[in-house]
Image (tube, coloured by chain):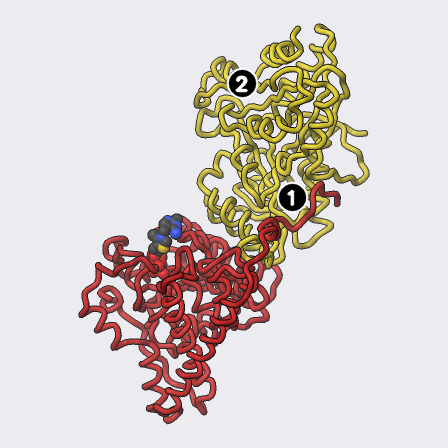
Amino acid sequence: MPAIQFREALRAAMVEEMERDETVFLMGEEVAQYNGAYKVSEGMLEKFGPRRVLDTPISEAGFAGLGVGAACCGLRPIIEFMSWSFTLVCMDQIINNAANIRYMSGGQFKVPIVFRGGNGIAHQLGATHSHRMEAVYSRIPGLIVVAPSTPYEAKGLLKTSIRCDDPVIFLESEKMLGEMGEVPEEEYLLPLGKAKVEREGQDVTLLSYGRPLQRVVRPAVKALSNDYNIDVELIDLRTLRPLDVQTIVDSVRKTNRCVIVDEDWGYCGMGAGIIQKIQKPCFDDLDAPIEYVHSDEIPVPFSHPLEEAMMPSVDRIIAAVQEVCYK
Amino acid sequence: MAVADQVQRRPPAPRPQSDGRLERERLRMMMLIRRFEERTYQEYTRPGQKIGGFCHLYSGQEAIAVGTAAIFDKSKDYLINGYRCHGHSLALGMSPHAAMAELFGKATGCSHGKGGSMHLFQAEVGNNGGHGIVGGQIPLGVGMAFAQSYKKTGGVTFCFLGDGAVNQGTHNESLNLASLFKLPCIFVVENNGVAMGTQVERASAEIDLAQRGCGYGMPHYNIDGNDVDVVITELGKAKEAAARGEGPTYIVANTYRFRGHSMSDPLKYRTKEEAERAKLRDPIKLYQQRMKDNGWINDEQIEALDHQAAQEIDQATRQADADPFPAPEDRFQEILAEKYPLEK
Ligand SMILES: Cc1ncc(C[n+]2csc(CCOP(=O)(O)OP(=O)(O)O)c2C)c(N)n1
């Protein structure tokens, strides 16, 4: 299998789906002539022309809503945001319109749209540009929330998201776009709403997704196995809404211990929501309270060491795992 | 109606030759909408209130919805609206029963009781909804026009908004996008002079709202929104231009709402004189007079139309009242289009 960059995997998914389905188009700031703020859409204007790859003015509410309206009328828009932080100015279009129109119309409309872009802390962008929006959108009935953790996952999940008849919030990370990973040459799709047991283990269940999974969780799992003799079952959640509760519960019933890692704030954070879903079905199986490793409850600081310090680290994860394993 | 009086209007359109058949249908629809809204008012305010939530009546503005419907092609055009959406929905052919049942929250309502007064939809005729967030529907309308342009359907989108919505950020973004992409979108601002209790002159630094459509490279002008013939002519021209690929038009249809903003509005911000003066320009009365002048209708026939409308609304209301509420388990339906886990 050839190794390609995360951004190339995303691009391949979009290109394949646009070749397959005429109603798919890409719209966003700088996606066309500039070839993408982060070069995800590089070459796509040339390939598909300005009818299907469209630059927009800096009008998030305008083009997010445009996408929703177009999706209601038979198109399959891919709307790229430069950052999910910027969706703070267009949430009405996503939360009120994309998520509710089907319900409020008694099922008369479907809204097949993918909103995608970089989510979370992307290194020294400061508090305004570093929001982790997953918990905000994962709360919303009517939305699907997806967070890939490798180029392989990114391509397979994005392809399914584009074919999905519901609105999908697709959370990437600017910091992951250059990461390499093996991606098959032949076509494949990955399911939405299905978590992946990435590593089987006996001692503790570790739950994570997206960037933190790649940045700190995988290294922590390696260290736990090599240096601490703790056998981790690692689950890549992949879809945050709907959450694959069954896969998590099955794992915790086996390991009797659970640690959740994300880069969100803890209070009302993504992990807090996951705990609410699993603590009851797992209560009798748990040998320790569920641990939740998250970012500090502060605005995201600019200075590199401060930013680094606020986020979950390999050490914090190891400490949490030791805590639940009483080791 | 201070502002509506001050701004320059387009002159009334020359009347086309006609035998009065279409006109009678338009008059009937305006009268039906008026009757529907008055019945809604009664049902909302009577003891044992059957309608809950926010409810905004269209009385006084009927000429705009009915004029639009007259040039609307249900096979390819779209209409999208704010929450004051009963009139437009009826004008596009929603049965008074489906509308009233929705207001009652019944399973037989157009949205199965999940939308309510502010969210009436009828997809099969291109009625893409009432939308509750002021200005939230404007980008959606642009997107619907985008779909028409992308698919080359030849259809156009009528995107309705209020004079209050002009002050939302989405207004600026949407007008710019629609014109930049040359989309077949006709923005119709229903200027009834007041947003809830805030008059245009207290909300917009420019009181001539047509000027708020300035700076986007599209035609922008005022029309008399109480004259159904003017609405037909002016929106018709904008529609033709849009269909020819000339892009959007911004039309301010000046009008007056006879009732309060919503049901709880005591109308303290209005004088009796203002309301009396507005009644003289009641779009239904104006149209009846014109039709009489043309010999298309007489008082007796008008009386009969009104009687018919009242009966139709009464029947629809009784039926809606007798209809069942949705089953409790229906609340989980129609949220997502797919089943998960989803494999494709
Ligand atoms: C974003 C938002 N802010 C406030 C409201 C509450 N609200 C509902 S209608 C309205 C007035 C809008 O007036 P206008 O746009 O002139 O429309 P009209 O009611 O006259 O049809 C307000 C403030 C809302 N629904 N949405």
The residue lying toward the viewer, choosing from A1 and B70, is B70
Which quarter shows the C terminus of chain B?
Answer: top right
Letter of the chain shown red in the rendering: B
The Cα–Cα distance between marks 2 and 1, rounded to whole angstroms, is 35 Å
Residue at image mark 1: A44
Sooner in the amino-acid sequence: mark 2 or mark 1: 1
Judged left or right of residue B226, residue A2 is: right
**Numbered circle sitting on residue A311:** 2
The picture places residue A327, in percent across and down from the top left corner, at 66, 6
Residue B117: x and y, percent?
A: 45, 60
Could you say which is closer to the camera, residue B332 or residue B24? B332
The chain displayed yellow equals A
Q: Is residue B337 visible?
A: yes
The x, y position of residue B165, in whole percent, is 37, 55
Residue drawn at 45 percent across, 16 percent down: A303
Residue reaching furthest to the front: B48
Residue extending farthest to the bottom is B295
